[in-house]
Image (cartoon, rainbow, N blue to C red):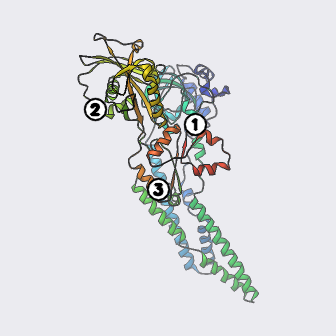
Amino acid sequence: MRNRSTKPLAAQSSEPFWSVPAETVMRNMGSSENGLSLTEALRRLDEYGHNVLGKRRRSTSAVLLLRQFSNPIVLMLIAAAVLSLLLRDPTDAAIILVIVFVSGVLGFWQERGAVNTVEKLLETVELKTTLVRDGAEVQVPVDEVVPGDVVVLSAGSGIPADCLLVSSRDLFVDEAALTGETYAVEKIPGIVPAETPMARQTNALFLGTHIVSGSGKAVVVHTGGATQFGAISERLQARPETEFEHGVRRFGYFLLEVTLVLLIAIFAINAYLGKHVLDSFLFALALAVGLTPQLLPAIISVNLAKGATRMARKNVIVKRLSSIENFGSMSVLCSDKTGTLTEGKVKVKKAVDPAGRDSEQTLFNAYLNAMFQSGFSNPIDTAIRDSQSFDISAWRRIDEAPYDFVRKRLSVLCSNGQNTRLITKGAVDKVMQICTAAVNGDGKTVPMPDAREAILRLHEQVSSEGFRTLGVAVRDMPPDTVHIARDDEKGLTFLGLLVLYDPPKPGIAETLRTLRAMGVSLKIVTGDNHLVAAQVARTIGFAEPKLMTGGELLLLNDRALPVRANLTDVFAEIEPN
């Protein structure tokens, strides 16, 4: 498959695509809301290549086998076997060659099996995406997506390439794979400044992320290697020599040097003492053969293969045997946060009133709101529904004012036969705007101006601890109310805050203690907010985590970076590019 992934027609603008109007990008790319024609799509597929992250390099059996005999020690052993044959000692030569062959075959067998397993797994997966072509929606394999295609977005679908959003409705995207952000990100059409970091490019969609809820359409701008994920993949193509391979290679060269020095010295001394030249040379060669550690490659291969077998029992595929030793020599482990140290799921930590005390009233009304909202399900509503079970059999939903990106709140109208209630939840500042009163620490209702400072202080305190918050407010409505609009969101009473977080995985703190006992230090590298990252670090066992942001990292020179990196526990707000 070809994958040139050259810059597409949108590159006619010198500005990044997220800072250009969608209409301009589509016009520059010769596209429209009716999508590309099939003929044009095939032409672009031929021009830009398939939408894959670089050409997958298939390791042939011959290459894998030859790689087993490429280190200096093995080459020395082969040379020793040849010398043994020249010295008319076929027995020693045969023994050496058998050891080398068994060692090589053992490594080849393990690596070939790992490669085959990975390839079979890849062959079982064929991803498709929905595009608009010739004005109709069609299912197309992801690798046939081309620049200018119009992608139809829906909940659960993956983003097939880097795209610019054309239209959306309640669209939330999980970008944790690129930014480390646990919470789904709101996406809306528009323009953002060119220097905006990826985590805040609200009009752009990136390969490797997926839709959590909502729907929309987007135009494909970059495919394959030209995407953000492609740039990362390209940097990972290099296969640096592992520390173990480097050590074995250095040891092999050292043995070679020692052997050559001894061979020359012994030959020279014997020649100086008047010994027969041929006998002296043969003696020196025999000594060189004897100095070569014939069993070392076999011992290394057997031990590494045993380690790979143990890893396989834990469902880990080892593609290169030499990587096993890296686990033993590791002193620093760099780990992502979201989904690795944490569960990667939003959960409700607590619900509090404006005084910061636990409030079941706040949680109950948030639960009603989450249960009765009929829009696209999102992780926050799921977390609220799962946090606690309330008996709401007496309540029924009447109407709803859906969430939008301007109001940043959602309201539902519900009734239990006695009370008809408007319940609103959303961004704290947006909910406070429509409230005229608030519940104080004594459970009494006070005017909003008297409670505003306490609410803002509580919000700031909770946010500084790395938690996300939602505001919850209610309003009693006339019993005969059967419809609500956005204009009805006024005169509400602020109940309190929902505190949300991404909990650490069970046992992760114990794992961290085990690593420390083994002499391994953990470095957390995440694209998430520095306050959130610091809070997670404290939760899993860092008493006072030392933190560095991506912006600070860019200011360091090459000499200062290793020093600061060694002293830092958490690297936050790190951009993938």
Residue contact between numbered discs 3 and 1, judged by CB atoms under 8 Å = no
Callout 2 amino acid: Ser
In front of the other: label 1 or label 2? 2
Between 137 and 321, which is closer to the camera in this rendering? Answer: 321
Secondary element type, mark 1: helix
Tell me: residue 441, above or below residue 565: above
Tell me the residue that label 3 is attached to.
Answer: 515
Tell me how far mark 1 sits from mark 2, CA to CA: 42 Å
Between 252 and 20, which is closer to the camera in this rendering? Answer: 20
Tell me how far mark 2 sits from mark 3, CA to CA: 38 Å
Tell me the residue that label 2 is attached to.
Answer: 389
- Seen at 66% across and 49% down, the residue is 560
Looking at this view, name the residue that lies furthest to the top.
Answer: 480
Between 231 and 220, which is closer to the camera in this rendering? Answer: 231
Q: Residues within 10 Å of mark 2 (few under 14, many from 20)?
A: few
Secondary element type, mark 2: loop
Q: Quadrant of residue 514?
A: bottom left
User: Would residue 13 be found to the left or right of residue 178 on screen?
Assistant: right
Secondary element type, mark 3: helix
Residue 504 disc label? none
Q: Quadrant of residue 9?
A: top right
Residue 178 seen in this snapshot: no
Tell me how far mark 3 sits from mark 1, CA to CA: 33 Å
Residue 228 disc label? 1
Looking at the picture, how far across and down is residue 137, in whole percent? Answer: 46, 23
For the N terminus, the quadrant is top right
Looking at the picture, how far across and down is residue 489, in whole percent? Answer: 40, 15
Looking at the picture, how far across and down is residue 185, in whole percent? Answer: 48, 30
Callout 1 amino acid: Gln
Tell me: residue 564, above or below residue 27: below
Residue 292 seen in this snapshot: yes
